[in-house]
Image (cartoon, grey):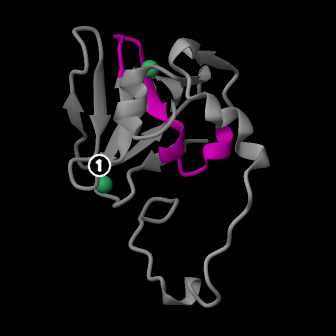
Amino acid sequence: MSITGGCQCGAVRYRIDGELGRASICHCRMCQKAFGGPFGPLVSARIAELTWTRGERKRFASSNRVERGFCGDCGTPLTFEYSDTWIDVSIGSLDDPSLAVPTVQLEVGSRMTWTDSIPALEHVLPPEGYYETIQSRQHPDHDT
Ligand SMILES: [Zn+2]
Ligand SMILES: [Zn+2]
């Protein structure tokens, strides 16, 4: 069974024909910037088992050791590339993100400590009828 994923606009899509490796979250400042969020959620896959099925990711060499892949059209973070054998993909870009459950966290020194209290935050709903006004342009969670 293959695992698929891609960016929000659908210009870049990938398929993994194999098992996912370790899933992690990284709190480093580079992941915070690259994801625009409190941490980077990533899961590893074997490069030999990953196929780009639509489009080309753009890459930014965030250091001398790492390139980060993203969609050049919509900006979705897609990869963390650091090895000849392994590549990490962003967990949120998987069509089924529940396939990757982080088991480790990295770089806790730069952790945004407010993430500890997320479960206790007040739940806020949009105004009545709001969703009926939304026409999503997000690519669906499957190949098209
Ligand atoms: Zn895109
Ligand atoms: Zn990081």
Query: Is the C-beta of the residue carrying label 1 under 8 Å from the nearest atom of ligand 1?
Result: yes
In this picture, is 52 found above or below 43?
below
Span shown in magenta = 81-99
The residue positioned 54% from the left and 38% from the top of the image is 91
Q: Is residue 96 above or below residue 142?
A: above
Q: How many marks?
A: 1
Residue drawn at (31%, 50%) of the image: 12
Residue at horizontal 66%, vertical 39%? 99
How would you rate the neighbour count of disc 1 (Cα within 10 Å): few for under 14, some for 14-19, many for 20 or more? some
Q: Secondary structure at mark 1?
A: loop
Name the quadrant of the C terminus: bottom left
Q: Residue at x 34, y 61 (%)?
A: 9
x and y, in percent, of residue 126 in the image: 61, 77
Indicate the amino acid at tag 1: Gly
The magenta stretch spans residue 97: yes
Give the x, y percent position of residue 60: 21, 28
Left or right: 73, with 100 as reference point: left
Q: Nearer the viewer, residue 56 or 38?
A: 38
Which residue position holds label 1? 75
The stretch drawn in magenta includes residue 92? yes
Displayed quadrant of residue 15: top left
Q: Is residue 141 left or right of residue 96?
A: left
Answer left or right for 133 relative to 55. right
Q: Quadrant of ligand 2?
A: top left
Q: Quadrant of residue 18?
A: top right
Residue farthest to the right?
120
Q: Where does the image place residue 82, in percent across and percent down from the top left?
A: 35, 14
Image location (x, y in percent) of residue 119: 77, 45
Looking at the rendered image, the quarter that the N terminus falls into is top right
